[in-house]
Image (cartoon, rainbow, N blue to C red):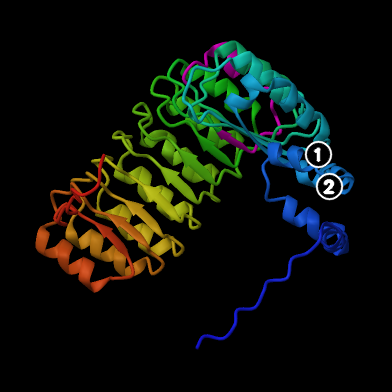
């Protein structure tokens, strides 16, 4: 015979209120910090205590807002920002991938310009050039991330006013010129992170040289698909930026082996090196990376056709912290060696073209 089930005790409204009141403000604020802005606003309407707690400035230092909210609930968004007197970081997303009103987004961002340090616009938001130019008055920014699709000379000129910038991600700015970027990097002298990938017309040796000469503390540089960049400017980067940790040059086929040897010899803090389709890089680069860059954890050598099995072996033996290695599309690296390397180093994720393709699960509906 089963034992009689116990009745669950239910709390009265007064008891629930008493429990809530017993929890210190600090704990409630910690709990509330996990809620998005509009949920906080809703919570503030439930009781006088929550109304006061939600007004705590520490809950409003980092905001993430979607374009749909800006478009359909503009006054509510403006109210949130007026409440966020200590906002430091703002991220604007576009989950519906629809065309946005660039001036409206910039207007919202500028309302927080007195305290805002970081502004991130998701890749689905491509601001018009005139809207980008208006960001030039937000001089407290230290970090700016935005798609560069529609940025032109006038927009770049205004970004140059943001002299406190330490992080600039502006991929896809195909309408800017080498002179635009040279002038920009002559004005911005505190940069530690730069991503101008796919700036195919503007990212040239002249622009990269200006970047390196004026930003000696550079740690992160992404120049993927910047086909005008050659070994000449990479040697300047090696000379001027010894703190470099992240270097991505996928598709920069004019970057040669001597330049990468100099990078490997002069930048011992490198942890990430991506050289996809840098077809003239040779074993010598891998030898110097293995000797000088002891913290190296990620290396992409896709399509580096001059590199041999011997060079790959030296890299794996010397780079003891390596976690990822791509050796796909390399003529000098065969199947037997690739499979042997994978078995000998299970702690390294080794990607090669001889791996079997994953079996497609046909039970899933796509």
In the structure shown, which secondary structural element does the residue marked by tag 2 occupy? helix
In the structure shown, which secondary structural element does the residue marked by tag 1 occupy? loop
Do the residues under discs 1 and 2 have CB atoms within 8 angstroms? yes
Residue found 39% across the figure and 56% down from its top: 298
When the figure is inspected, residue 55 is found, relative to residue 225, above or below; the finding is below
Residue 158 makes an appearance in the image: no
| Magenta span includes 160 | yes
Residue found 46% across the figure and 22% down from its top: 173
Q: Is residue 167 left or right of residue 330?
A: right
Residue assigned mark 2: 50
Q: Is residue 290 left or right of residue 16?
A: left
Q: Nearer the viewer, residue 360 or 252?
A: 360
- Which residue is farthest front? 1
The magenta span reads: 149-168
The circle on residue 45 is 1
Residue 48 image point, x, y percent: 89, 44
Residue 106 image point, x, y percent: 66, 20
Residue 287 image point, x, y percent: 31, 60
When the figure is inspected, residue 210 is found, relative to residue 357, above or below; the finding is above
Q: Nearer the viewer, residue 102 or 311?
A: 102
Indicate which disc, 1 or 2, sits on the residue closer to the N terminus: 1
Q: Nearer the viewer, residue 314 or 6?
A: 6
Q: Residue 19's image quarter?
A: bottom right
């Amino acid at each position: 015979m089963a034992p009689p089930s116990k009745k669950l005790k239910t709390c009265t409204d007064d008891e629930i209120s008493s429990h809530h009141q017993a929890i210190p403000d600090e704990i409630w604020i910690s709990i509330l910090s996990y809620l998005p802005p509009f949920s906080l606003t809703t919570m503030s309407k439930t009781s006088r205590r929550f109304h006061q707690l939600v007004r705590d400035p520490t809950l409003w230092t980092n905001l993430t807002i979607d374009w749909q909210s800006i478009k359909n609930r503009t006054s509510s968004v403006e109210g949130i920002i007026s409440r966020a007197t200590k906002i430091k970081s703002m991220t604007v997303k576009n989950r519906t991938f629809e065309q946005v009103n660039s001036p409206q987004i910039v207007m919202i961002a500028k309302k927080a310009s007195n305290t805002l340090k970081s502004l991130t616009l998701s890749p689905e938001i491509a601001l018009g050039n005139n809207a980008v130019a208006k960001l030039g008055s937000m001089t407290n920014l230290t970090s700016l991330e935005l798609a560069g699709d529609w940025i032109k000379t006038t927009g770049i000129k205004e970004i140059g006013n943001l002299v406190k910038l330490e992080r600039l991600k502006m991929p896809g700015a195909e309408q800017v010129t080498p002179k635009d970027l040279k002038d920009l990097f002559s004005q911005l002298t505190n940069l530690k992170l730069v991503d101008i990938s796919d700036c195919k017309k503007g990212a040239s040796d002249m622009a990269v040289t200006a970047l390196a000469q004026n930003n000696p503390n550079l740690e992160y540089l992404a120049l993927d698909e910047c086909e005008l960049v050659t070994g000449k400017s990479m040697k300047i980067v090696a000379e001027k930026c010894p703190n470099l940790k992240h270097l991505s040059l996928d598709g920069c086929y004019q970057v040669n082996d001597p330049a990468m040897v100099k990078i490997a010899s002069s930048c011992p803090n490198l942890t990430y090196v991506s050289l996809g389709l840098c077809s003239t890089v040779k074993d010598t680069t891998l030898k110097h990376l293995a000797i000088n860059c002891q913290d190296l954890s990620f290396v992409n050598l896709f399509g580096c056709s001059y590199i041999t099995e011997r060079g790959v072996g030296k890299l794996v033996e010397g780079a003891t912290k390596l976690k990822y290695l791509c050796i796909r599309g390399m003529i000098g690296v065969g199947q037997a060696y690739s499979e042997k390397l994978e078995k000998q180093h299970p702690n390294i994720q080794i990607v090669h073209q001889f791996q079997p393709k994953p079996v497609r699960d046909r039970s899933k509906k796509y």
